[in-house]
């Protein structure tokens, strides 16, 4: 508080180190659930993908975008979410620790706050936590490659998990047998197991699971009825533009998504 400002103790502030993020760079904060292998087990997540858990992750990420400033896009899969601050952001003077901790704590508290909207009567058994890291990307190419990397990771893991749990749940294998069966297999082999043994075309699996979740801001024109305070109580229709967070489950590696949303990246 201000009456402490000039105490003899004030010098300890000088021990704080500068963690300002380099100007002009996109600031990415990636969160990842701590020990979610266990969290998923204890909360009986369905395998390979629990849609309640994915919905809760997205809801928490939307809360981060709505409550914090300057996030232009977020991408999530499994127990992780990445948030991209616009390169010109000056929020919290671009201090990495401030940005990262605000993202992590807003996300964690939202995860608990919105839990019952997704898991209904099933209680949350202990407070989950998320680690955070900050990465700076100096070019649009680097940022797009970062997001492509995360989406490629989603694809690789989801293909593996889909075959693994199909072998267990429908093929009657133990988890050890399924693991053994998949050792050394390539993507084509996994697709082939699904197709020839279980009549599953991986490409027809849900976009949410194969592509993850991309959140961006979308402008919508809304018509609102305004009651004028004039004596004749006239009603007026006013068109306002509102921003809201929209979820996509599409490819973000190719050009199409970026051509359709040219205002996400800055020059
Ligand atoms: P910032 O986001 O910059 O931290 P702030 O509003 O949190 O803004 P602080 O300097 O952290 O500002 O001050 C916290 C404020 O919260 C106090 O000024 C006080 O008004 C309120 N507050 C916190 N804890 C209590 C408490 N236990 N009882 C009453 N008021 C409290
Ligand atoms: P760490 O603390 O090192 O991150 P972790 O156990 O969280 O350890 P991750 O590599 O982050 O390991 O993997 C997250 C795990 O959480 C997945 O392997 C999966 O078991 C589980 N998981 C997360 N989300 C879901 C979901 N929606 N449905 C099913 N399982 C999930
Ligand atoms: Mg305080
Ligand atoms: Mg405070
Ligand atoms: Mg990890
Ligand atoms: Mg994790
Ligand atoms: Mg993870």
Image (tube, rainbow, N blue to C red):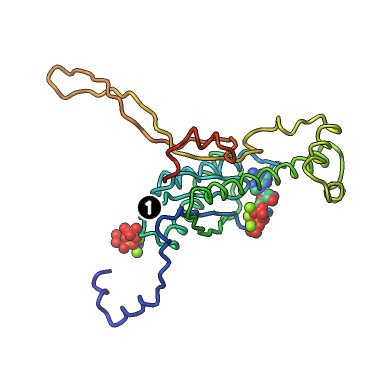
Ligand 1 appears in which quadrant?
bottom left
Vertical placement of 256 versus 234: above or below? below
Residue 219: quadrant of the picture: top left
Taking the spot 49% from the left edge, 57% from the top edge, the residue there is: 136
Q: Position of residue 244 (x, y in %)?
A: 42, 35
Residue 40 in view here: no
- The 10 Å Cα crowd at callout 1, few under 14, some 14 to 19, many 20 or more, is some
Residue 96: quadrant of the picture: bottom left
Viewer-nearest residue: 88 or 236: 88
Q: Position of residue 140 (x, y in %)?
A: 49, 48
Q: Is residue 181 left or right of residue 39?
A: right
Taking the spot 42% from the left edge, 45% from the top edge, the residue there is: 266
Q: Is residue 5 left or right of residue 194?
A: left
Q: Is residue 197 left or right of residue 101?
A: right
Vertical placement of 203 versus 267: above or below? above
Taking the spot 38% from the left edge, 49% from the top edge, the residue there is: 69
Q: Position of residue 50 (x, y in %)?
A: 66, 41
Residue occupied by mark 1: 89
Q: Secondary structure at mark 1?
A: loop
Vertical placement of 128 versus 263: above or below? below
Residue 167: quadrant of the picture: top right
Residue 102 in view here: yes
């Amino acid at each position: 508080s201000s009456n402490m400002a000039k105490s003899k103790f004030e010098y300890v502030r000088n021990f704080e180190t500068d963690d300002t993020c380099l100007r002009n760079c996109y600031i990415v904060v990636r969160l990842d659930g701590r020990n979610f292998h266990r969290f998923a087990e204890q909360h009986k997540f369905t395998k390979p993908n629990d849609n309640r858990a994915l919905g809760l992750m997205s809801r928490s990420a939307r809360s981060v975008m709505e409550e914090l400033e300057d996030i232009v896009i977020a991408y999530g899969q499994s127990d992780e979410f990445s948030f991209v601050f616009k390169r010109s952001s000056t929020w919290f003077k671009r201090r990495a620790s401030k940005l990262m901790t605000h993202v992590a704590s807003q996300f964690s508290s939202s995860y608990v706050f919105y839990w019952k909207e997704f898991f209904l009567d099933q209680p949350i058994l202990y407070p989950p936590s998320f680690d955070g890291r900050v990465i700076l990307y100096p070019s649009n190419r680097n940022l797009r490659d970062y997001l492509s990397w995360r989406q490629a990771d989603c694809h690789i893991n989801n293909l593996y998990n889909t075959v693994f749990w199909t072998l267990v749940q429908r093929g009657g294998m133990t988890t050890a047998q399924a693991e053994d069966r998949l050792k050394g297999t390539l993507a084509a082999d996994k697709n082939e197991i699904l197709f020839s043994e279980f009549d599953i075309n991986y490409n027809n699996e849900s976009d949410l699971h194969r592509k993850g979740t991309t959140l961006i801001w979308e402008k919508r024109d809304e018509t609102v009825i305004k009651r004028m305070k004039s004596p004749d109580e006239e009603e007026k229709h006013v068109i306002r533009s509102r921003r809201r967070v929209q979820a996509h489950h599409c490819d973000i590696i190719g050009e199409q998504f970026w051509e359709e949303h040219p205002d996400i990246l800055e020059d």
